[in-house]
Amino acid sequence: MNKLFLFLYLLSNRHGDFDQNPESNLPQYHEKRSSFSREKKGMNGKLLFFSLLLLLTHPIHSFAIASELEENYRYFGVNAIVHQAGESDYYEVQTNGDSEKEGFVFTINHPGTGDNFQLTLQLKGDSSVILLIEETNRKGKYLKEFQSPSIQLTDDWKQYTQELALDENTKQMDVMVLTSQKQKSNFSFRNISVTID
């Protein structure tokens, strides 16, 4: 009876081919099992080595929201209408013209590390605009803001880049592109990219 149980145990584990006499195969079974354990440890060591090598050769220096992820942003009009131009890669903004600082806004959550902020985007249109960036803390309390000089847009796409140092308590940023004066205007934007490192 004990031999039958031993045979079924060895058969269910399938660590190798055995003779018909299970007792005679016990040394072979333990040898194969020990060899399997050594191979498994060796494989784990290799996986750990290559994982560390990958981290060392491909460090993550910054958090980036690339232009190809632009659709993840939600754009809201500020006394203006914002809509995507058909199936194209850009958005159009039509301001009401009731006051200055009309345009669009979108929000970025701070990734948790980094205090150097860089915004890059392309603009074109018939008006002059400013870049306005407001920083808030974890509770939504206003910390500070940055306002760029006035930018005169043209009929051709032009790329603009703005860098600034973030407050150490910043957790969220509202990025706005607004008209610099009271006027009913039309302008377009595309390829927005934000990097924080």
Image (spheres, rainbow, N blue to C red):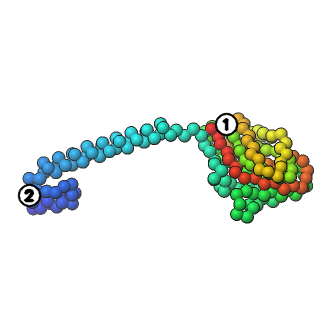
Location of residue 79 in the rendering, given as x and y in whole percent from the top left corner: 84, 56
Q: Name the amino acid, label 1.
A: Asn
39 left or right of 52 in image: left
- Mark 1 or mark 2: name the one nearer the start of the chain: 2
Identify the residue at image location x=13%, y=56%: 18
Residue 21: image tag: 2
Residue furthest to the front: 156
* Labelled pair 1, 2 in contact (Cβ < 8 Å): no
Q: Secondary structure at mark 1?
A: strand
115 left or right of 99 in image: left
Within 10 angstroms of label 2, few (less than 14), some, or many (20 or more) residues? Answer: few
Check disc 1 and report the residue beneath it: 116
Q: Secondary structure at mark 2?
A: loop
Q: CA distance from mark 1 to mark 2?
A: 72 Å
Residue 42 visible from this viewpoint = yes
Location of residue 61 in the rendering, given as x and y in whole percent from the top left corner: 57, 38
* Camera-nearest label, 1 or 2: 1
